[in-house]
Image: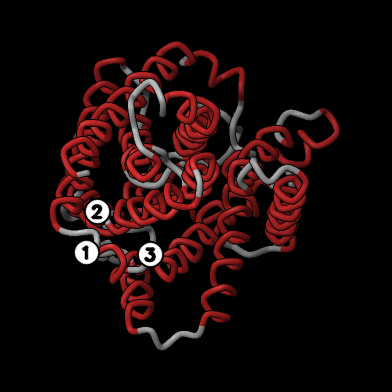
């Protein structure tokens, strides 16, 4: 399967890593996509900036006036943005992780979140393999549903060496399902008998992207929103061990294989170590609120640019060939994460 005509394997990595003027053209296009996503979010606050970035990237790859530019001269830079800017954004994501707040929720809640993440990850991975989704899509979709959407997919794809088309297809599916959750989950609060705080916990444990969690939980008020964000941060905290586990698995399968530069892969990727270091720095309390706010803004911009780059790699006609299987996996994973989170909330409230 090929969504784009592009160099493959190590040659592709080397072509993207050379920062030519054409590469910077693509990076500038990704920055423009991030700006456009911010404008969409400002005009429609219910649409998270990162969701808008993915949708705009997909649109740019299919509009007649932009299609040849996105798939041609801008492709190396857009691919570069989808990887390098994603890494930096994930490191900054650690600064938004309040470990002290997470631990105050108690060990029962920690165990509940870990159980939901494990059930979602392994359940989605198993279902994706059974449905015959190609490449690393089952792994990436399982990661996106269980942790934090597109950001987690980008992190795991870095250590798994996933093809760009698998990453783009997985991001598109997880983003679509997470966006649908904004409209669907609030309608289920009353039928499921959830109080506002319990609804917030359910949203935090089951919705993928942080922005989507905020958009969904705020419908039940500030109490629900606070609970949702704390539970979501706890899921984000599990990103580092999950990425490390995938890196260990990949290293075990490719024992003796070296990277194109001739070095063996690091046991823990640098950006994962940076994520943990940023979370530890946040926990010390030495950073002023203004610095944390600046870091949050920078994180949103970098991730939006990266997701615009990933979205621009989506080729809808090719994606449609696995559309039925992908939709079945998305629905199945949604049932798993929502059901596991609902049971977990009932056991811990």
- Marks 1 and 3, Cα distance to the nearest angstrom? 16 Å
Q: Earlier in the sequence, mark 3 or mark 2?
A: 2
> Looking at the image, can residue 10 be seen?
no
- At horizontal 50% and vertical 62% (from top left) the residue drawn is 89
Secondary structure, mark 3, is loop
| Disc 1 and disc 2 in contact, CB within 8 angstroms | yes
Name the spot of residue 228 as percent of width and height, x first: 39, 49
The residue closer to the viewer here, 161 or 195, is 195
Name the spot of residue 222 as percent of width and height, x first: 49, 52
Q: Earlier in the sequence, mark 1 or mark 2?
A: 2
- Quadrant position of the C terminus in the picture: top left
Q: Earlier in the sequence, mark 1 or mark 3?
A: 3
Secondary structure, mark 2, is helix
Residue under circle 1?
Answer: 267
Residue most toward the bottom? 286
Q: How many marks?
A: 3
- At horizontal 49% and vertical 66% (from top left) the residue drawn is 88
- Marks 3 and 2, Cα distance to the nearest angstrom? 18 Å
| Within-10-Å neighbours for mark 2: few <14, some 14–19, many 20+ | many
Identify the image quadrant of residue 294.
Answer: bottom right
For residue 239, above or below residue 3: below
Residue under circle 2?
Answer: 247
């Amino acid at each position: 399967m090929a969504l784009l005509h592009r160099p493959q394997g190590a040659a592709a990595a080397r072509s993207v890593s050379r920062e030519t003027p054409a590469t910077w053209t693509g990076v500038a296009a990704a920055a423009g996509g991030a700006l456009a996503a911010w404008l969409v979010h400002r005009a429609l606050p219910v649409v998270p900036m990162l969701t808008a970035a993915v949708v705009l990237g997909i649109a740019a790859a299919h509009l007649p006036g932009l299609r040849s530019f996105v798939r041609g001269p801008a492709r190396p830079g857009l691919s570069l943005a989808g990887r390098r800017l994603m890494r930096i954004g994930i490191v900054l994501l650690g600064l938004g992780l309040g470990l002290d707040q997470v631990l105050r929720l108690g060990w029962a809640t920690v165990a509940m979140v870990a159980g939901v993440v494990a059930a979602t990850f392994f359940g989605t991975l198993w279902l994706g393999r059974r449905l015959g989704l190609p490449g690393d899509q089952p792994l990436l979709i399982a990661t996106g549903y269980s942790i934090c959407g597109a950001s987690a997919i980008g992190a795991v794809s870095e250590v798994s060496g996933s093809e760009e088309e698998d990453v783009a297809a997985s991001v598109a599916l997880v983003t679509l399902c997470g966006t649908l959750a904004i409209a669907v989950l609030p309608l289920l609060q009353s039928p499921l008998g959830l109080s506002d705080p319990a609804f917030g916990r359910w949203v935090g444990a089951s919705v993928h992207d942080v922005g989507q969690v905020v958009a969904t939980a705020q419908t039940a008020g500030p109490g629900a929103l606070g609970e949702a964000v704390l539970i979501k941060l706890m899921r984000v905290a599990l990103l580092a061990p999950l990425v490390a586990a995938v890196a260990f698995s990949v290293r075990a399968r490719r024992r003796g294989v070296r990277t194109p530069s001739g070095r063996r892969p690091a046991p823990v990727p640098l950006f994962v170590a940076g994520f943990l270091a940023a979370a530890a720095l946040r926990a010390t309390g030495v950073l002023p609120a203004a610095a944390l706010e600046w870091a949050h803004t920078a994180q949103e911009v970098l991730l939006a640019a990266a997701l615009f780059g990933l979205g621009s790699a989506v080729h809808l006609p090719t994606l449609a060939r696995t559309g039925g299987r992908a939709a079945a996996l998305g629905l199945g994973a949604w049932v798993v994460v929502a059901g596991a989170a609902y049971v977990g909330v009932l056991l811990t409230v």
